[in-house]
């Protein structure tokens, strides 16, 4: 018979242990410490030192390999980061921490091991879900509805936007609810062209909502428009949980951070209550425990699911908080379809600094949400790329392929084509399906001996038909601009859709709901089975609308934090 | 750069940045200062380069090819001035696949030139050299037996372009003027007018 590990005696008892320091964990820490709760934060990577770790203002020429090695496109190291210049400690493969993919599936999992996690590099796109996004099943009979409504979350969107700082404009579009916005920067030339083309095609093109500040906010200085948000920002002018939430929380005296701490499992007092978190101190390779009154999982959706599935004992042999059996199920990523196009109107334009924000200044919210008889369910938004970006290793490979020559002609060709490429990226909603989930691989463990995840992933016709619609829409936009499509950038799936996980919006493996039989947690992220166990990352998502998840993770975590603080005060957990 | 930010102590600024002092509110000058420091660090010591991957003959061929792929013109210097041979050598030394592509491709090229002209590629005259490149540069026009040469040239052209356009010479050539700290973001009205008119989207 299986026995559960015992909690050790001694050591301080924290009110709350938060596992993971990204958007969910950072927001949790910020709100809980402000409310006077004693918090221990455990992070599987090191502390962040922005001045040392970020390559924000470096140029390729500062390095002999020009950014081509150490994560660049000529890297052969299988433990690949995003790119050489990207914010640190984010990888497609982590040394010693594998995962497996079931035969017939294709899935890739991006993980960051550092304070702040993926918020150090992410795209900062901050879109609210719409009212209909919380009740998708009512709309088309697919998937499941959320146990909460837009009205429940709206006050927390307000709080999150006001605190982290989000730019945008009030548009009154149902699919893209307005929020608490700072003034956005003006659009770049190619973005204005897309906007005008969109107007002729009936597609709205509006200022993107980005977690980048344009006015002083909570001691942070406004953006200085260097365009390198993905490398991490030394002035903290964009949102990262590390700089915006956790560093200030350290000053409250209520927060103790345990870096390089890899959570192994949750230690219980029977199936209904967590007593401690067991973790591996990576620096000494020793096993340790932290005792607590409540635990918050914010380790990233799949890591949180893994932790619950790996915490087993009498009465919960399926994993802790998993009496429903849904943990690991309903995994979703976003449908990614990326193309680039050549726009001759931009050729010969006077050179100017187009860096601006790291990301498009404009975007296209979904415009057919109320259309009947669509050829696919749900919708997508479109992101816009282009401008005179900093030349890097790989920037002109496409031009070389196009030109096929050499010498002065090649130089002249590259000079004339620089800045004439406009990228369009569709990001759409995937419907959860039975063939897409993660589970514990029965045969494989990581270097700490912790069983790893095995992924199953499949796109269905819902997504491939959406990708086709994206393709046709992009072609129409380029045509309207007098340009032409050069090519589809992600061709790893036959439909041209990105492979599962590649958009790094993986969510939904411990979904919320009112029914304990079909959901893992309730609308506050509180486990149905274990009342002092909460989940505040993307794992609780019931659906994955085309609204990049981070802002909603922040809003839901804020809501959970207030609820949890109150429950602690009342002695309910 | 130091003249522009003479008021601030660079050492102090860097120390603050290294300590992660960002939340106190790093002023714009500090951000600009970091850009300035990054720019100043670009200066590399000149001297005779000792290749890590190529032998002397191969390296000489790489230099010649880089110069042919991106020669000096009225606007800017050549790929050699931009450090392309050193870059190609470094990548070849660190990436086995590319290392083999380069070594094998160079050997293939020499063999072709020996057969046709009785000399290695570098020993051939410029007309003979470009005569060969004209046959392998364009994938669509090349005859099938030149396949290995086409593939080799494709890679060395990419690597040469990588090195050239990431150098200060290449950056200036294409006209990238960013990576600056600015207080506002603006788009020149004349640039927008130009593109709008050309696209018909006015």
Image: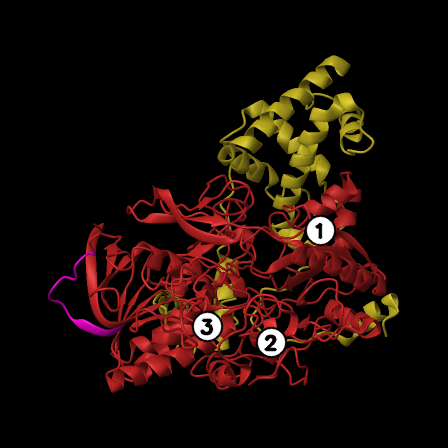
Chain colours: A red, B yellow
Work out which quarter of the rendered image holds the C terminus of chain A and state it. Answer: bottom left
- Secondary structure of residue under mark 2: loop
Distance from the alpha carbon under mark 3 to that under mark 1: 38 Å
At which x and y percent is residue A488? 71, 51
Q: Is there any visible trace of residue A27 in the rendered image?
A: yes
- Secondary structure of residue under mark 1: strand
2 and 3 marks on the same chain = yes
In the rendered structure, the answer to whether residue A209 lies left or right of residue A373 reads: left
Q: Are marks 2 and 1 in contact (CB under 8 Å)?
A: no
Residue A11: in magenta span:
yes
Prevalent SS, magenta region: loop
**Mark 3 belongs to chain:** A
The residue pinned by badge 1 equals A488
Badge nearest the viewer, 3 or 1: 3
Q: How many marks?
A: 3
Neighbour tally class for label 1: few under 14, some 14-19, many 20 plus, Cα within 10 Å: some
Residue A513, numbered circle: 3
In the rendered structure, the answer to whether residue B83 lies left or right of residue B135 reads: left
Magenta span? A4-16
Residue A209, numbered circle: 2
Q: Are marks 3 and 1 in contact (CB under 8 Å)?
A: no
Farthest residue, direction left:
A10
The quarter of the picture where residue B68 lies is: top right
């Amino acid at each position: 018979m299986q026995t559960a590990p015992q909690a050790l005696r001694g050591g301080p008892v924290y009110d709350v242990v938060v596992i993971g320091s990204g958007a969910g964990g950072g927001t949790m820490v910020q709100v809980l410490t402000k409310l006077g709760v004693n918090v221990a934060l455990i992070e599987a990577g090191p502390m962040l030192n922005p001045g040392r770790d970020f390559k924000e203002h470096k140029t390729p020429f500062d390095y002999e390999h020009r950014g081509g090695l150490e994560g660049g496109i000529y890297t052969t190291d299988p433990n690949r980061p995003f790119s050489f210049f990207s914010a640190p400690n984010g990888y497609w493969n982590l040394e010693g921490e594998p995962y497996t993919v079931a035969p017939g599936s294709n899935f890739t999992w991006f993980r960051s091991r550092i304070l702040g996690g993926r918020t150090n590099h992410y795209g900062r796109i901050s879109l609210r879900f719409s009212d209909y996004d919380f009740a998708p099943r009512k709309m088309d009979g697919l998937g499941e509805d959320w146990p909460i409504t837009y009205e429940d979350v709206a006050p927390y969107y307000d709080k999150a936007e006001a605190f982290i700082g989000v730019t945008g404009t009030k548009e009154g579009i149902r699919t893209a609810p307005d929020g608490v916005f700072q003034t956005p920067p003006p659009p770049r030339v190619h973005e204005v062209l897309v906007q005008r083309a969109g107007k002729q095609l009936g597609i709205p093109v509006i200022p993107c909502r980005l977690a980048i500040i344009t006015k002083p906010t909570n001691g942070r200085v406004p953006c200085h428009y260097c365009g390198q948000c993905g490398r991490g920002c030394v002035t903290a002018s964009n949102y990262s949980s590390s700089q915006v939430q956790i560093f200030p929380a350290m000053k409250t005296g209520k927060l103790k951070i345990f870096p390089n701490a890899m959570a192994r499992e949750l230690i219980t007092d029977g199936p209904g209550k967590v007593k401690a978190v067991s973790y591996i101190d990576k620096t000494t390779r020793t096993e340790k425990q932290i005792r607590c009154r409540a635990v918050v999982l914010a380790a990233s959706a799949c890591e949180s699911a893994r932790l619950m599935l790996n915490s087993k004992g009498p009465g919960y042999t399926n994993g802790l908080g998993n009496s429903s059996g849904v943990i690991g199920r309903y995994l979703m990523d976003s449908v990614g379809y990326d193309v680039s196009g050549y726009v001759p109107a931009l050729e010969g334009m006077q050179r100017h600094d187009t860096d601006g924000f790291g990301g498009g200044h404009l975007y296209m919210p979904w415009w057919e949400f109320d259309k009947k008889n669509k050829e696919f369910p749900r919708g997508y938004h479109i992101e816009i790329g282009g401008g005179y970006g900093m030349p890097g290793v790989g920037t002109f490979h496409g031009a070389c392929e196009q030109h096929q020559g050499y010498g002065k002609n090649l130089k002249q060709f590259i000079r004339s084509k620089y800045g004439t490429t406009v990228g369009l990226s569709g990001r759409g909603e995937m419907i959860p399906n039975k063939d897409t989930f993660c589970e514990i691989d029965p045969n494989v463990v990581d270097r700490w001996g912790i069983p790893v995840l095995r992924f199953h992933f499949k796109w269905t016709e819902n997504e491939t038909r959406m990708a086709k619609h994206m393709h046709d829409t992009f072609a129409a936009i380029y045509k309207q601009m007098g340009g032409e499509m050069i090519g589809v950038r992600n061709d790893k799936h036959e439909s041209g859709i990105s492979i599962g996980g590649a958009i790094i919006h993986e969510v939904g493996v411990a979904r919320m709901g009112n029914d304990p039989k079909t959901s893992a947690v309730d609308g506050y992220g509180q486990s149905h089975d274990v009342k002092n166990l909460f989940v505040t990352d993307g794992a609780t998502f019931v659906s994955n609308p085309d609204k990049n998840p981070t802002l909603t993770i922040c809003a839901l975590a804020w809501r959970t934090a207030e609820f949890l603080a109150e429950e602690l005060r009342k002695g309910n957990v | 750069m130091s003249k522009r930010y003479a008021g601030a102590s660079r050492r102090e600024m860097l120390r603050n940045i290294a300590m992660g002092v960002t939340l106190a509110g790093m002023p714009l000058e500090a951000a600009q200062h970091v850009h300035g420091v990054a720019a100043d660090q670009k200066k590399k010591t000149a001297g005779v380069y000792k290749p890590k991957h190529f032998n002397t003959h191969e390296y000489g061929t790489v230099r010649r090819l880089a110069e042919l792929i991106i020669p000096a013109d009225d606007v800017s210097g050549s790929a050699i001035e931009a450090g392309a041979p050193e870059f190609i050598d470094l990548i070849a030394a660190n990436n086995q696949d590319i290392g083999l592509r380069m070594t094998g491709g160079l050997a293939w090229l020499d063999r072709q030139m020996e057969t046709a002209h009785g000399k290695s590629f570098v020993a051939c005259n410029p007309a003979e050299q470009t005569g060969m490149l004209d046959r392998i540069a364009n994938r669509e026009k090349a005859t099938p037996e030149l396949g290995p040469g086409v593939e080799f040239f494709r890679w060395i052209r990419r690597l040469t372009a990588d090195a050239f356009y990431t150098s200060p010479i290449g950056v200036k050539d294409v006209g990238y003027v960013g990576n600056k700290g600015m207080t506002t973001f603006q788009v020149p009205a004349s640039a927008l007018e130009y593109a709008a008119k050309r696209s018909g989207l006015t």
